[in-house]
């Protein structure tokens, strides 16, 4: 096992290439399994969640070939409607997309309840509601979701909550269903648009992705295509936030600035100067960081996946900031770790009150989930002294090459071997 070791205080400077979007790739790889030909997917981030998704697809007999570290070729022509491994599924939330994929392809799917980051309850009632409306009989038994239909038929589906996962699953099942499916109150995230663009390249007939009404006219066949994934706006937002926390100046490259508007708007409020170009953004830190209130919301609101990172930044801002987590019920578990570093944050339910400026000092902390890990890195970069972060497998789930990218920006950061005291004691 390894941990990350950071000596704080260096201002981030220079430029960094942003990788492909994790959450788009995690929807597009299973979508490729609906195709009647071979798909080549480019700009796929080299992260462990993608490795897991590839293993899941291989378990279903999809041929997966790595062309290079960011390009994957998928040949689903001999895909089987079997049950993918429980051990793989429980580690990744997006494994539930196989429900829509297999149902769309075979009119049947059997998938274990998904895992992923623990933000409190993560229901799938809206996925089931949508697939049932399309004509699938869905049951959950012993942790296994079974969905079966004679034939899927297009219909109107109104989502009671805006759900990325339910929108993706319904799109995957409906793309080859008979007739027209209309998803109302659909998620509008950039990765929903990317999935629709990918499916349309394969021959699907999807209209309205990016608005809250998505219309899907079922087609009989989907062809193999070559497609490039959009840049990751959360990875991009994380580097911008880290640069501002250290008082630095950076340019992020290979981004779509429009996807980052809710994030850059807040960074400006906190004190950054932001310059947007066609596919890059430059951030220059101001003299001081100012307090700011943030409420997370579905796109185009401020993304919940940037909430821990901005909270870490706000510990360094003057005054009292309030962060309202309006998407998940339990996404402040990292606060305890930031407190070890000297942060002054109190949490009441879905509200965190951050008193700045706290002088952060390096400490030994643990990543409680993916974005919590990113927040600890940001805190470590701006803290005095040395911070060590355990449980870095969470961070590696979603950030390609983060150590090298930060080093190139001037951070003093490395991976070191973690002594496994438990096994040492067990071996005594
Ligand atoms: C996806 C992202 C995750 C992000 C989240 C919100 C992936 C792989 N993960 O997760 O990083 O934090 O979007 O932007 O893309 N809900 C229900 N019933 C359902 C489904 C969801 O009530 O059937 C609720 C959830 O409890 C939550 C809200 O809807 O409060 C949003 O969840 P959803 O958009 O579905 O998140 P995921 O797709 O799981």
Image: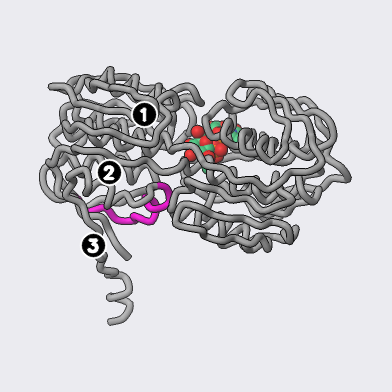
- Mark 1: which secondary structure? strand
Q: CA distance from mark 1 to mark 3?
A: 36 Å
Residue at which label 3 appears: 416
Q: Residue farthest to the right? A: 150
Q: Are marks 3 and 2 in contact (CB under 8 Å)?
A: no
Residue 386 placed where, x, y %?
A: 14, 50
For the record, the magenta segment spans 387-398
x, y percentage for residue 397? Answer: 43, 51
Residue 391 in the magenta stretch? The answer is: yes
Q: Which of the image's four quarters has the N terminus?
A: bottom left
Task: Find residue 348 and name its label.
Answer: 1
Relative image position of residue 208 (x, y in whole percent): 65, 23
The relative height of residue 20 versus residue 61 in the rendered view (above or below) is above
The residue carrying mark 2 is 376
Q: Is residue 320 left or right of residue 82?
A: left
Q: Earlier in the sequence, mark 3 or mark 2?
A: 2
Question: What is the crowding at mark 3: few (fewer than 14 residues within 10 Å), some, or many (at least 20)?
Answer: few
Provide residue 30's location: percent of width, then percent of height. 63, 49
**Residue 185 in magenta?**
no
């Amino acid at each position: 096992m390894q941990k990350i070791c950071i000596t704080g205080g260096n201002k981030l400077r220079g430029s960094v290439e942003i990788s492909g979007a994790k959450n788009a790739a995690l929807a597009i790889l299973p979508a490729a399994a609906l195709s009647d030909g071979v798909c080549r997917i480019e700009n796929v981030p080299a992260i462990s969640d993608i490795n897991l998704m590839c293993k899941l697809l291989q378990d279903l007999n999809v041929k997966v070939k790595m062309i290079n570290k960011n390009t994957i070729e998928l040949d689903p022509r001999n895909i089987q409607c079997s049950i993918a491994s429980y051990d793989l599924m429980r580690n990744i939330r997006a494994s539930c997309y196989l429900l829509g994929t297999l149902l769309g392809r075979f009119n049947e799917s059997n998938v274990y309840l998904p895992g992923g980051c623990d933000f409190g309850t993560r229901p799938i009632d809206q996925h089931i509601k949508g697939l049932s409306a399309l004509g699938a009989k869905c049951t959950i038994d012993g942790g296994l979701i079974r969905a079966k239909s004679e034939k899927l038929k297009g219909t109107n589906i109104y989502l009671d909550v805006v759900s990325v996962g339910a929108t993706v699953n319904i799109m995957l099942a409906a793309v080859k269903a008979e007739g027209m499916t209309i998803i109302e109150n659909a998620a509008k995230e950039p990765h929903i648009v990317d999935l629709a663009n990918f499916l349309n390249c394969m021959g699907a007939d999807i209209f309205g992705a990016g608005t809250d009404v998505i219309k899907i006219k079922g087609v009989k066949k989907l062809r193999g295509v070559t497609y490039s994934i959009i840049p990751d706006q959360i990875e991009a937002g994380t580097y911008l936030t880290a640069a501002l926390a250290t008082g630095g100046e950076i340019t992020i490259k290979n981004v779509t600035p429009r996807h980052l508007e809710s994030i850059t708007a807040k960074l400006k409020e906190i004190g950054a100067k932001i310059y947007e170009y066609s596919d890059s953004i430059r951030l220059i830190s101001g003299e001081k960081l100012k307090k700011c209130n943030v409420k997370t919301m579905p796109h185009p609101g401020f993304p919940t996946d940037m909430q821990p990172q901005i909270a870490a930044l706000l510990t360094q801002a003057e005054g009292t900031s309030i962060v309202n987590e309006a998407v998940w019920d339990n996404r402040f578990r990292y606060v305890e770790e930031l407190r070890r570093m000297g942060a002054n944050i109190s949490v009441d339910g879905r509200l965190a009150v951050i008193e700045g400026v706290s002088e952060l000092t390096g400490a030994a902390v643990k990543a409680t989930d993916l974005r919590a890990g990113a927040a600890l890195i940001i805190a470590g970069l701006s803290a005095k002294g040395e911070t060590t972060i355990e449980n870095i497998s969470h961070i590696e789930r979603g950030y390609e090459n983060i150590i090298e990218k930060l080093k190139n920006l001037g951070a003093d950061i490395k991976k070191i071997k973690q002594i496994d005291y438990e096994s040492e004691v067990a071996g005594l």
